Image (spheres, helix red, strand yellow):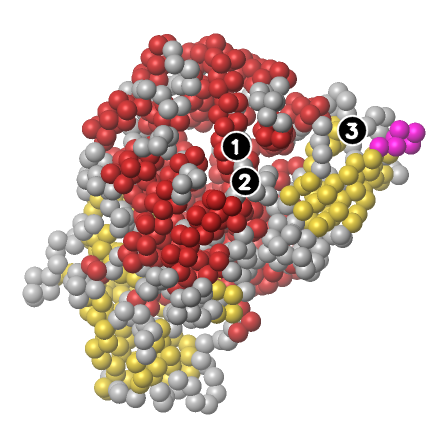
């Protein structure tokens, strides 16, 4: 790394409590696009004995004045990113006036303009782009906020309850808000705009009436009912399952088009990416409906796990995120299919999280060193964090887990705490020792478990020996406490009771040592073992399971998840065998027959059957190899899919035609559409007039799930139909950018040498906008993640396209740039030609004069 700039890391070990408390803050915003005036009056109390400067964070602010107790004050030092005020009295009020420019703020952090509306994003450290403040999560203050704006901004919103509103002499208007709950600055929010509003109410279980309001761009009201229903379901679920009730009198959600992530849990005033709110059957897929429900739930659940109890410092982020992801996963599983939700979560773990954990950005769920906090909103902190909570839930059971939650709130409501505090509550409430378990918080990497099975015919004893190996990239890791769930099946597929010497054994084995043996007796024949049932711990299990055992598990395991898992393993083995032995380029008869039975019999949940008919993704397969054989994986999966399509085409047609989609959003209708979609996926691969007709009918339907199933089927099959259907979609939906994102994604997935030229051309499309993260992700994100063959072209043109984009985004929106960089992070896992071409792009970024901290941190780690 030759770049002269070397941003400094912050360390968990250096944590110090703040030298001042801020008891209250009174903010006034006089809104104007290029010069919004912010007046902040902070009521302070010194928290330490003796002299202490007050070092307030502030970035890109124009300081106008400082006063202490209403008297102008000049004893301060203004640094690049801090205002250091000296010699303050022990208690005082500091008034700071500064200007900011929302219109030119393209980072989408701090106060910015999204379309015509002002909005904010303060987590993690965006508040310092609004005013000088102790911008850290352990400073909890009550906030009063006054917003002044032109009348055209009809809605002036902030956290808490509205105190007053009125007209000003100059023709402008104002509103005053008060949040009675003390909060850190990252939960502050302000919105000013002219919206359509969907209003509703919710009565809590203690009988309080809560006003609900959903603010969207004009004309979008018809797309709001699903999000509102999701909110009410979330409120009810949190009361039932966690005994948690909403606290303010009003809950507001605002949808904006320019947003860096999905949504933000600001107290009482959530701000959402419009794609995570707006939906109707014509414009959104069933998957979008599910995502909206889960994100609305996630943000709502933060009101307790995040807002009422928050993080002491940002290293503790998983305290709120891991726990809230666990809660939203449970919400989705209680309301919908537990198995499908588990499959989705495990896919994320095994592909994205395992690869992050094995790569240059590997970090424990509680990181110890951070340069740019925004880089740590990762699959590790969120999803592995949720798995760590789930393991505690498995070890404690629901009842004790809920006692732990209750104790956590009893001890820490209104505080900023650490992950240790959470585990202590769980352990104290349950009486279960979690000392060793806590290593999950401080050790990075994915543990590997080598499992061996022995069966002693004479004694009828079956033994599992489990060896726990440290991750290759974390050789010094100490053994973890791993809840390892199993099921044993007999030859007939019946579950075998687990016991030894007359003592029952729980199906969750406590793996705590580097090597352990677990024996079970009373077994007349060698059982088939289902291991790591339901993915009971985020580990890699290494063991050889025969094809016959996998087929047995697929038929008989009690866990739907484990049945899916066995099927995936069977398919993964087939792809690996084909790569090792190029003559074995077809799927075995048994596998095709198993798939055929699924399509014909259609027993159980149709959505699960749809899932079982999918081949493992490129990422899933790539995870199996030290050096990813890109061309082979692409070629073999294409070949297998064609084989399935050819051998089962009659069954797919019959299945497609016999399924009746009633067009509703019921779970049954969603499952029907999922299975019909898979049929289309395979049928598109064979150029037959009958198939083309089915595809065109679906593409012309009024249900976006069906339309998209048809379009993605033709695009992935490189079917001659795709040009016409894509053009038709473009002219039909050009007025709706969120729908056009689906079109951009389809364009990005097109095969053939023209793909890159096409994307460069699409940058000129009237709907495309580099400053909108949704557009960029739809087009280039889909390309780099899903168009494997073209992104990983050997001539490096795919990498060049992403590199060019990153150079541009680095200046516009570093947070988005850093997210888009992810595919380059695993450059070492590719063959020489590809890895050198990716590395060249990283080096190109490293040499940028204006390299952002966000990109610096990742590029620097990647190149080390
Ligand atoms: N807490 C926010 C994420 C903030 C990301 C900052 N770069 C959304 C969520 O996890 O609920
Ligand atoms: Zn969250």
Q: Measuring 7% from the left and 61% from the top, which residue is drawn there?
A: 171
x, y (%) of residue 67? 25, 83
State if disc 1 and disc 2 touch (CB < 8 Å): yes
Q: Earlier in the sequence, mark 3 or mark 2?
A: 3
Mostly what secondary structure, the magenta segment? loop
In front of the other: label 1 or label 3? 1
* Residue found at the far right of this picture: 458
Which residue, given by chain and number where applicable, does mark 2 sit on? 628
Residue furthest out toward the left: 170
In the image, residue 793 sits, relative to residue 570, either above or below, namely below
Residue 369 in picture, x, y percent from top left = 51, 65
Q: Earlier in the sequence, mark 1 or mark 3?
A: 3
Where on the picture, by quarter, is residue 557?
Answer: top right
Judged left or right of residue 437, residue 315 is: left
Number of the front mark, 3 or 2: 2
Element carrying mark 2: loop
Q: Which image quadrant: the N terminus?
A: bottom left
Q: Nearer the viewer, residue 402 or 783?
A: 783
Q: Which residue is mark 3?
A: 527
Q: Position of residue 246 (x, y in %)?
A: 42, 52
Q: How far across and how far down the image is residue 584, in percent?
A: 61, 22
Residue denoted by label 1: 633
Residue density around tag 3, few if under 14, some if 14–19, many if 20 or more, within 10 Å: many
Based on the picture, tell me whether residue 456 belongs to the magenta stretch. Answer: yes
Mark pair 1, 3: CA separation: 34 Å
- Queried whether the magenta region covers residue 111, the answer comes back as no
Regarding mark 1 in the picture, which secondary structure is present there?
A: helix
Q: Nearer the viewer, residue 73 or 758?
A: 758
| Residue stretch in magenta | 455-460
Q: Residue shown at 49%/75% (left/top)?
A: 17
């Amino acid at each position: 790394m030759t770049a002269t700039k070397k941003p400094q890391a912050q360390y968990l070990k250096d944590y110090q409590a703040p030298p001042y408390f801020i008891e209250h803050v009174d903010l006034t915003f006089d809104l104007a696009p290029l010069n919004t005036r912010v007046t902040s009056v902070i009521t302070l109390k010194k928290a330490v004995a003796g002299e202490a400067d007050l070092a307030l964070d502030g970035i890109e602010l124009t300081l106008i004045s400082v006063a202490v107790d209403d008297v102008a004050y000049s004893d301060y030092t203004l640094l690049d990113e801090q205002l250091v005020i000296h010699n303050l009295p022990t208690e005082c009020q500091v008034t700071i006036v500064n200007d900011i420019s929302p219109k030119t703020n393209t980072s989408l952090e701090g106060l910015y303009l999204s379309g015509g509306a002002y909005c904010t994003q303060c987590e993690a450290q965006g508040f310092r782009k609004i005013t000088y403040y102790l911008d850290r999560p352990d400073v909890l203050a009550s906030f009063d906020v006054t917003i002044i704006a032109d009348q055209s901004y009809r809605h002036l919103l902030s956290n808490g309850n509205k105190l007053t509103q009125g007209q000003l002499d100059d023709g402008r208007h104002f509103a005053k808000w008060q949040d009675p709950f003390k909060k850190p600055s990252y939960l502050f929010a302000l919105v000013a705009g002219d919206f359509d509003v969907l209003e509703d109410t919710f009565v809590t279980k203690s009988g309080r009436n809560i006003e609900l309001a959903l603010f969207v761009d004009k004309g979008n009201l018809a797309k709001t009912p699903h999000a509102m229903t999701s909110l009410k379901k979330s409120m009810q679920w949190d009361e039932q399952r966690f005994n948690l009730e909403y606290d303010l009198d009003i809950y507001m959600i605002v949808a904006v088009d320019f947003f860096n992530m999905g949504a933000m849990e600001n107290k009482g005033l959530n701000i959402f990416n419009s794609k995570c709110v707006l939906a109707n059957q014509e414009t959104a897929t069933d998957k979008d409906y599910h995502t909206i429900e889960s994100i609305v739930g996630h943000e709502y659940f933060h009101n307790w796990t995040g807002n009422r109890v928050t993080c002491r410092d940002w290293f503790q982020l998983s305290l709120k995120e891991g726990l809230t992801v666990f809660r939203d996963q449970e919400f989705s599983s209680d309301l919908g299919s537990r198995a499908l939700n588990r499959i989705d979560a495990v896919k994320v773990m095994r592909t994205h999280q395992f690869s992050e954990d094995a790569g240059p950005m590997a970090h424990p769920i509680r990181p110890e060193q951070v340069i740019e906090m925004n880089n740590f909103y990762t699959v590790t902190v969120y999803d592995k964090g949720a798995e760590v909570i789930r393991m505690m839930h498995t070890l404690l059971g629901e009842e004790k887990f809920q006692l732990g939650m209750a104790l956590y709130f009893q001890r820490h409501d209104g505080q900023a705490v650490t992950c240790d505090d959470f585990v202590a509550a769980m352990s104290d409430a349950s009486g279960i020792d979690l000392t060793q378990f806590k290593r999950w918080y401080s050790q990075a990497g994915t543990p590997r478990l080598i499992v061996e099975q022995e069966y002693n015919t004479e004694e009828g004893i079956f033994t599992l020996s489990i060896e726990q190996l440290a991750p290759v990239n974390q050789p010094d890791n100490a053994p973890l406490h791993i809840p390892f769930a199993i099921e044993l099946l007999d030859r007939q597929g019946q579950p075998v009771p687990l016991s030894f010497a007359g003592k029952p054994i729980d199906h969750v084995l406590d793996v705590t040592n580097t090597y352990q043996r677990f024996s079970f007796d009373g077994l007349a024949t060698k059982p088939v073992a289902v291991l790591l049932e339901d993915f009971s711990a985020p580990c890699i299990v290494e063991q050889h399971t025969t094809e016959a055992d996998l087929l047995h598990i697929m038929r008989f395991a009690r866990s739907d998840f484990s049945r899916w898992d066995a099927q995936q393993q069977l398919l993964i083995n087939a792809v690996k065998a084909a790569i090792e032995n190029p003559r074995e380029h077809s799927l075995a008869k048994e596998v095709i027959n198993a798939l055929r039975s699924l399509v014909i019999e259609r027993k159980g949940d149709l959505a699960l059957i749809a899932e079982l008919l999918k081949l493992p993704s490129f990422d899933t397969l790539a995870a199996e190899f030290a050096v990813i054989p890109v061309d082979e994986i692409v070629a073999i999966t294409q070949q297998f899919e064609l084989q399935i399509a050819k051998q089962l085409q009659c069954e797919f047609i019959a299945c497609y035609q016999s399924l009746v989609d009633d067009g509703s959003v019921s779970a049954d209708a969603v499952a029907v559409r999922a299975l019909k979609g898979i049929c289309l996926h395979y049928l598109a691969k064979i150029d037959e007039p009958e198939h083309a007709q089915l595809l065109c009918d679906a593409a012309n339907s009024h249900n976006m799930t069906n339309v998209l199933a048809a379009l993605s089927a033709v695009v992935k099959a490189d079917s001659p139909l795709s040009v016409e259907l894509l053009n038709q979609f473009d002219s039909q939906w050009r007025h709706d950018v969120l729908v056009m994102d689906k079109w951009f994604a389809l364009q990005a997935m097109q095969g053939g040498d023209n793909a890159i030229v096409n994307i460069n051309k699409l940058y000129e499309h009237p709907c495309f906008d580099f400053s909108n993260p949704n557009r960029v992700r739809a087009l280039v994100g889909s390309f780099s993640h899903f168009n494997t063959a073209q992104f990983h072209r050997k001539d490096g043109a795919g990498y060049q396209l992403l590199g060019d984009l990153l150079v541009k985004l680095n200046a516009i929106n570093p947070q988005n740039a850093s997210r888009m960089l992810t595919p380059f992070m695993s450059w070492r896992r590719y063959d020489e030609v590809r890895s050198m071409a990716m590395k060249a792009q990283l080096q190109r970024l490293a040499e940028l004069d204006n390299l952002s901290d966000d990109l610096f941190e990742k590029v620097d780690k990647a190149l080390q």
